[in-house]
Image: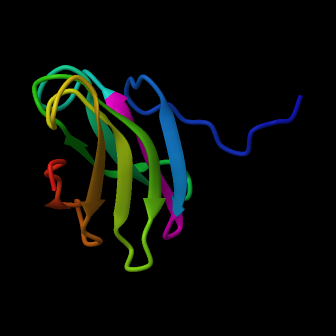
Amino acid sequence: MKSALLTKRIGTSHRVYQARAHGGYALVGCTMSEGAGDWDFWLVKTDADGNMQWNQTYGGIDEDKARVVIQTVDGGYVIAGQTWSFGAGDSDAWLCRLAPVGIPAPVDIDPTH
């Protein structure tokens, strides 16, 4: 069994996906302990040692589950997942494009466009 170079628990999340991000990590998952309702997208930015620098939730009153995060060339993030809060019906794909500066702000999170 290999030893982990870094292990750190941050909050409670259903699943966690990560991307390297400017000397640290961007972690995305879903949380019920933060946010607007049921499960919400949860983006956490850490430093290289795994210490949280900031976090932000995105979602509505129903379930919203993040599945992947990538960092864009401008330093922002794209999160993709499923939403039951927005869209045309039961479960819809949801793509969030986030700004690169500080605590990210949604550029356009309306899944109907």
The quadrant of the rendering that contains the N terminus is top right
**Residue 106 visible here:** no
**Residue 43 visible here:** yes
The answer to whether 60 is drawn above or below residue 70 in the figure is above
Q: Tell me residue 86's x, y (percent).
A: 14, 36
Magenta span contains residue 45: no
What residue is drawn where x is 16% and y is 37%?
87
What residue is drawn where x is 56% and y is 53%?
49
The answer to whether 33 is drawn above or below residue 35 in the figure is above
Q: Tell me residue 26's x, y (percent).
A: 45, 53
Dominant secondary structure (helix, strand or loop) of the stretch shown in magenta: strand
Extent of the magenta region:
21-30
Q: Is residue 1 left or right of residue 87?
A: right
The residue lying toward the viewer, choosing from 53 and 113, is 113
The quadrant of the rendering that contains the C terminus is bottom left
Quick one: which residue is furthest to the right in this view?
1
Q: Tell me residue 36's x, y (percent).
A: 11, 30
Magenta span contains residue 22: yes
Q: Is residue 63 left or right of residue 37?
A: right
Quick one: which residue is furthest to the bottom in this view?
74
The answer to whether 1 is drawn above or below residue 77 in the figure is above
Q: Tell me residue 62's x, y (percent).
A: 16, 22
What residue is drawn where x is 10% and y is 25%?
61
Q: Is residue 33 left or right of residue 69?
A: left
